[in-house]
Image: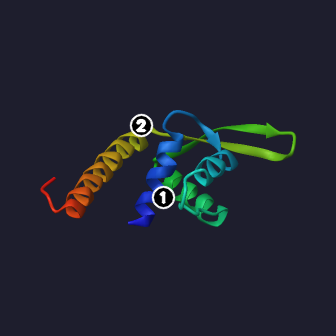
Amino acid sequence: MRRGWVETCVFNVLANQELHGYGIMLRLQDIPGLGITEGTLYPLLSRLRLQGLVTVRRWEESPDGPARKIYGLTARGRQILELMNDHFEVMRRQHQAARKGTRP
């Protein structure tokens, strides 16, 4: 479940803006309790790129070091994001109902 949650968070970060890996990491670190590391993020981005869900759209020169890859969502990535967000919303409602002892 956590793997799917981390992917959903990455997709949501990229939903409105293309970012380089460090920018994605900073956004994810703002999410309380997520606890993602670079060792988790970069392999995930690579896998999502190979699956055609994330693309490297351009290289950006960095005055602080090597050029950076800029990541964005593909059309298929946006479709998957919508499905994932819908799925987690259903799970949220089910969880709330279970805690209250009512039907969703």
Mark 1 neighbour class, 10 Å CA radius: few under 14, some 14 to 19, many 20 or more: some
Point out the tag, 2 or 1, that comes first from the N-terminus. Answer: 1
Indicate the colouring scheme.
rainbow
Q: Nearer the viewer, residue 65 or 101?
A: 101
Q: In the image, which disc is placed on residue 50? A: none
Which tag is nearer the camera, tag 2 or tag 1? 1
Res. 76 image quadrant: top left
Q: Which residue is mark 1?
A: 6
- Local secondary structure at mark 1: helix
The 10 Å Cα crowd at callout 2, few under 14, some 14 to 19, many 20 or more, is: few
What amino acid does circle 2 point to? Ala
- Amino acid at pointer 1: Val
Q: Position of residue 2 (x, y in %)?
A: 43, 65
Query: Residue 23: x percent and y percent?
Result: 67, 45
- Picture coordinates of residue 74, whole percent (x, y): 47, 39
Question: Which residue is situated farthest in the left direction here?
Answer: 103
Q: Which residue is rendered at x = 38% and y = 66% of the image?
A: 1
Q: Quadrant of residue 51?
A: bottom left
Residue 4 placement: quadrant: bottom left
Residue 102 at x, y percent in the picture: 14, 58
Q: Is residue 64 left or right of residue 79?
A: right
Q: Residue furthest front?
A: 100
Label 2 to label 1, Cα distance in Å? 19 Å
Q: Nearer the viewer, residue 76 or 101?
A: 101
Question: Along the horizontal axis of the image, is 51 left or right of 89?
Answer: right
**Does residue 51 show up?**
no
The residue positioned 55% from the left and 52% from the top of the image is 31
Farthest residue, direction top? 16
Residue at 21% over, 60% down: 100
Q: Residue at x 73, y 44 (%)?
A: 68
Q: Secondary structure at mark 2?
A: helix
| Residue occupied by mark 2 | 75
